[in-house]
Amino acid sequence: MPEPQLPPSSDSSGTKPSNPEERKEFGEGSIKGLAAPETANNAASTGSFVPLLTLGIPGSGTTAILLGALIALNLQPGPLLMQDRPEVFWSVIFSMYLGNIILLILNLPLVPYFARILAVPRTYLIPFVLFFAMAGAYIGQNNAPELLLLLGFGAFAILMRFADYPLPPC
């Protein structure tokens, strides 16, 4: 079963260049073919914050999780967020700008090293990631039941994966 795609990235990957020479490169790892859907996906992920912050309606799976986090922190997203807590609203906007600048600075020289991570076999990578996830869960609250919660949600995610449920709800 193919992974679901958000509409902007799937729409942009369907666009073909008018030049027949460039058209042959699409689907073969062409830089332009990879950059188009990623650019659209990044624009859509930033744009999905607009309905969340202005109306309190999540625009994507990521903003749905953020909505839950904001409500857990006793913050109500929507028009009153800008009025009652403008520092939270503008912090989110500023963090998006700052994050893009930092990614631009770091990604240009580090892309070859990031690509080498793909060569690491999963048998080595999974225990490494699991260790840091467990360390982060324990350090967050200094509480051992947090580890059980992590393992429970991890087992649930594995079961969902075997049942062919999509990762984000599209």
Image (tube, rainbow, N blue to C red):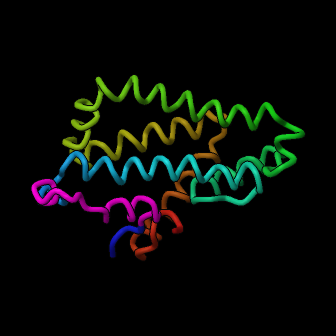
Which residue occupies 42% across, 76% down? 163
Which residue occupies 55% across, 27% down? 98
Q: Is residue 103 left or right of residue 107?
A: right
Nearer to us in this view, 68 or 56 = 56
Q: Is residue 67 left or right of residue 63?
A: right
Q: Position of residue 90 (x, y in %)?
A: 72, 33
Task: Reply yes or no: does residue 18 show up in magenta.
Answer: yes
Nearer to us in this view, 51 or 144 = 51
Q: Is residue 153 above or below residue 86?
A: below
Q: Is residue 27 above or below residue 73?
A: below
Task: Reply yes or no: does residue 143 show up in magenta.
Answer: no
Which residue occupies 22% across, 45% down? 31
Q: Can see residue 148?
A: no
Q: Is residue 76 left or right of residue 30?
A: right
Nearer to us in this view, 141 or 54 = 54
Q: Position of residue 13 (x, y in %)?
A: 32, 61
Q: Is residue 122 above or below residue 136?
A: below
Q: Quadrant of the N terminus?
A: bottom left
Q: Position of residue 159 (x, y in %)?
A: 45, 70
Q: Which residues are magenta?
A: 5-23
Q: Is residue 80 left or right of residue 33?
A: right
Nearer to us in this view, 130 or 59 = 59
